[in-house]
Amino acid sequence: MTEERAEKFLELFNKGKEFTEELLRENQRLRYRLASLETESTAGFDEEVSRLRAEVQQLTEENRRIAQRFKEVEEENKDFANRYIEVEEQNNNLANLYVASYQLHSTLDFREVIQIVQEIVINLIGAESFAILLLDEKTNELKTIASEGEDVMPGIETLSTRLGDGVLGSVAKTGESYYINQDMEGGKVTLEKPLAAVPLKIKEHVIGLVVIYKLLQQKDSFSAVDYELFSLLAAHAATAIFSSKLYSQSERKLNTIQSFLDLLTTTS
Amino acid sequence: MPLENVNFLVVEDSPTMRQLISFSLKRFKNARIIEAVDGVDALKKLSGPEKIDLILTDINMPVMDGLKLVSLVRQNATLRNIPIIIITTEGAEEDRERGLALGANAYISKPIQSSHLIKTISELLAV
């Protein structure tokens, strides 16, 4: 009975021992598996980190490139905007010049031509007080034939000066435009010293002057297009005035001849 | 949106200015430009069959000046909503205030800048 018990105990003990050994083996196997998994995952993580780092670097570089390009495009845009403003201005100037020239040659009536010159000086240049003088070639005297803003500059309606005398006379003699030097002359405008005096000339032959004494209150100074308009006036207004004068003279002569012929035919 | 098929009435006694303004207005596609030489002529054109979308008027004109025209247009039930731009050599602040008080929508001093005129018209007609 005791032996039987001892055998059973031994048998149980052996089974326990086998089970414990098996547990130890399984434990070792799992430890090994854990260790290998740990190694595997660390290696993958490092790889992922370096891949992401490279990607970040690439994106940073791309971002820098895009920022640089953005800056360049912004500069280009500014440049285009400035160019657009310049073109607009140029367009405006050309329109002014086109209209002025078109109007000057739209009539052969002397009074109308003078009226158009006045309109150009008032509306396109923006002058408040000015005079148009014509040269009498017999007396060599420049005399006002039209003026505006007499209240601002009394006496402009009866201006009269000899060729070569004073500022106006020398502009007519030399054919060179005169613009007051605000710094040197203190900007003091007088009948003899206007803001600007522009000769009206056909080639080198001066037939008169446009003399400006005061600009409209909303205009501080002459702009670039004003100088272009002065050049245009110098040539085109001169030819328009000259041809309208010739036309009216020939009309007068024609009328006289016609009247003479009529008289002859009626008396004969 | 670009403005198209707009009918403009340009009231100006100076042919040079009428041509210059019309030149600028041609920037609007299919713009129709009707010209009048003074206020009375403008009222005649306004009572005609053509529907006017915007009036541009000078102040100093013979027969009837621009200020009188503005005031008459604003008193007229059928015309009172037409936008009006005054274009003039009168650059003083009190002149501007007087023009706007009479009912003009904008006041531009000469010499005009085409781009400024176009911008003003676009703003008025876009409302």
Image (cartoon, coloured by chain):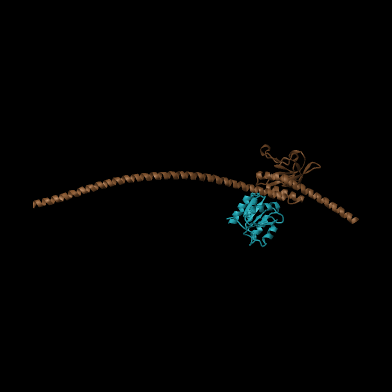
- Total label count? 0
Q: Which quadrant of the structure image shows residue B101?
A: bottom right
- Front in this rendered view, residue B90 or A144: A144
- Seen from the viewer's position, the closer of residues A43 and A156 is A43
Residue A103 x/y as whole percent: 71, 50
In this structure image, what is the colour of chain A?
brown
Most extreme residue toward the right is A268
Residue nearest the observer in this picture, A73 or A226: A73
Instruction: Specify the chain shown as cyan.
Output: B
Residue depicted at 90% across the width and 55% down the height: A267
Quarter of the figure that contains the C terminus of chain A: bottom right
Q: Is residue B14 visible?
A: no
- Which residue ends up furthest to the top in the rendered image? A184
Q: Is residue A44 left or right of residue A199?
A: left
Is A137 placed above or below B70 here? above
Residue B106 visible in the displayed image: yes
Give the residue drawn at x 12%, y 51%. A7
Query: Residue B98 location in percent, x, y?
Result: 64, 53
**At 23% across and 47% down in the image, what residue appears?**
A25
Residue A189 x/y as whole percent = 70, 41
Q: Nearer the viewer, residue A62 or B118?
A: A62
**x and y percentages locating residue A258 in the rendered image:** 85, 53
